[in-house]
Amino acid sequence: MRRKLAAGNWKMNGTGVALSELETLSGSHPTSSVEILICPPATLLHRASNTVEGSGVTVGGQDCHAAVSGAHTGDLSAEMLLDAGASAVILGHSERREDHGEQNEDIRAKARSAMDAGLQAIICVGESLEQREAANTLDIIGGQMSGSIPDQATGENLIVAYEPIWAIGTGKVPTLEEIGEVHDFIRARLERRFGEGVGRSVRLLYGGSVKPGNAVEIFAVSNVDGALVGGASLKAEDFSGIIRALENA
Ligand code: PGA
């Protein structure tokens, strides 16, 4: 049985005042059948980890460097995230692929480092609108998966998030059939590469304009084990609505 996961990505949003939302969220979910993860900006990680202590909420990072330590000004290692209280890290988000030119092999190296440090790696894949319109979606996702998922992946250390780039922050969502097609494809690829046991235990998240209003139908799609949520994770009330939908899925 795969435990459902509601993951929030605050992106570059939030200073200390935003911790009050996290306090409300953790107060509303002292325990949950669902794993609840918030990935705040790195500057808030340590305080966020103290805020959620003893609740059903955990915290994670939004990126890490592939190296353990060294001369990499401005970067953070997986071990540092762990030390600040993280249990997971988002890797290869399309905004990082775009803003920082991250390639599949960079993401694979980062994921290796995150897994070595004991963090769960949430590896993001997803097609652009042009790629979808050209019917290249599955090729793109397949390439991103083989390029960015390291060989040491297991059901415990890997989570794959399918995030169509054109659905992120736009209010546009693929049809349920489109989501199902990609999630089934990702599951089949994982089973083929890692064997059925591991392939079936990796959790698959959908991301891109998930809101309390569309969460129920998205979570009913097969092989959707949760969501990676941007905008709607910033307000405790909205994110709680998504968590409740997942608890009842
Ligand atoms: P969104 O972002 O929920 O604001 O569309 C999703 C993401 O980028 O993870």
Image: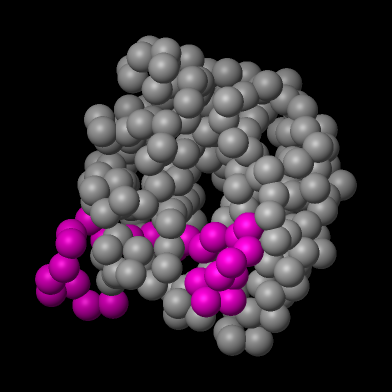
Work out whether 158 lies above or below 240: above
Give the quadrant of the N terminus: top right
In this rendering, position of residue 32 left or right of residue 137: right
Q: Is residue 62 magenta?
A: yes
In the rendered image, which quarter is residue 38 located in? Answer: bottom right
Tell which of 27 and 173 is nearer to you. 27
Magenta region, residue range: 48-74
Q: Main secondary structure of the magenta part?
A: loop
Query: In the image, what residue occupies the spot 45% across and 46% down?
Result: 122
Give the quadrant of the C terminus: top right
Work out whether 103 lies above or below 150: below
Work out whether 186 lies above or below 15: above
Q: Is residue 186 magenta?
A: no
Q: Residue 99 at what x, y percent from top left?
A: 42, 61
Q: Residue 96 at what x, y percent from top left?
A: 42, 57
Q: Residue 188 at what x, y percent from top left?
A: 48, 15
Query: In the image, what residue occupies the spot 31% across and 51% down?
Result: 118
